[in-house]
């Protein structure tokens, strides 16, 4: 579902897109979809292949990782305007963690190919993503 009227104000609030102008936002909207997940839903699992970047419109998710194939540990809770799913796309590797909804959640989903075109076109986005990516990666080691 592509509900541009409801997505545009959200894009304006997302720090990741703060350097972009309205034309850029309108272009992004052409390539995203809005998805709804109920509380307790696993959006993807650690080890899955990566197909998209997600930006939270409403609700919260928890990020859970396996350590030593034994214990699962919650490494983060992410809420509105935060993104997830960038790490596997950057590294072209499987998902580094599972992401599970804590409440009912609405997410803006940007498909892998559109993610790569966007960061090529807008280097400011690549910069913000990389900063967060390195911070998150450091936390996971
Ligand atoms: P990815 O590896 O594609 O899929 C799992 C996602 O969880 C990952 O991208 C990040 O977006 C997110 N993630 C992983 N580790 C952390 C962390 N320490 N803090 C916040 N988010 C994380």
Image (cartoon, grey):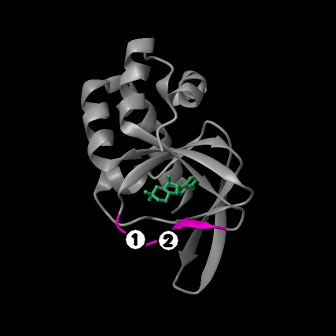
Q: Which residues are magenta?
A: 41-49
Q: Is residue 127 visible?
A: no
User: For this view, does 28 lie left or right of residue 121?
Assistant: right
Residue that label 1 marks: 48
Residue that label 2 marks: 45
Q: Give the residue drawn at x 31%, y 55%.
A: 91
The part of the image, by quadrant, that contains residue 15 is top right
User: For this view, does 86 lie left or right of residue 42?
Assistant: left
Tag 2, which secondary structure?
loop
Q: Is residue 36 magenta?
A: no
Between 103 and 19, the one lying in front of the other is 103
The part of the image, by quadrant, that contains residue 41 is bottom right
Residue count near mark 2 (Cα–Cα under 10 Å), binned few <14, some 14–19, many ≥20: some
Q: Is residue 46 visible?
A: yes
Between 96 and 51, the one lying in front of the other is 51
Residue 57: x and y in percent read 62, 39
Q: Give the residue drawn at x 68%, y 61%.
A: 38
Residue 30: x and y in percent read 37, 31
Which secondary structure dominates the residues rendered in magenta?
loop
Tag 1, which secondary structure?
loop
> In the drawing, what numbered circle is on residue 19?
none
From this view, report whether residue 72 is shown above or below residue 3. below
Residue count near mark 1 (Cα–Cα under 10 Å), binned few <14, some 14–19, many ≥20: some
């Amino acid at each position: 579902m592509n509900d541009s009227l409801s997505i545009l104000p959200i894009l304006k609030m997302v720090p990741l897109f703060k350097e972009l102008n309205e034309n850029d936002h309108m272009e992004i909207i052409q390539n995203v979809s809005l998805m709804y997940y109920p509380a307790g839903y696993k959006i993807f699992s650690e080890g899955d292949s990566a197909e998209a970047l997600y930006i939270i419109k409403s609700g919260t998710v928890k990020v859970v990782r396996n350590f030593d194939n034994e214990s699962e540990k919650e490494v983060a809770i992410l809420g509105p305007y935060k993104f997830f799913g960038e790490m596997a796309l950057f590294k072209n590797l499987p998902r580094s963690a599972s992401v599970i909804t804590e409440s009912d959640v609405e997410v803006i989903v940007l498909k892998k190919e559109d993610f790569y075109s966007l960061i090529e076109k807008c280097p400011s986005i690549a910069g913000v993503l990389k900063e967060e990516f390195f911070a998150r990666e450091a936390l996971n080691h």
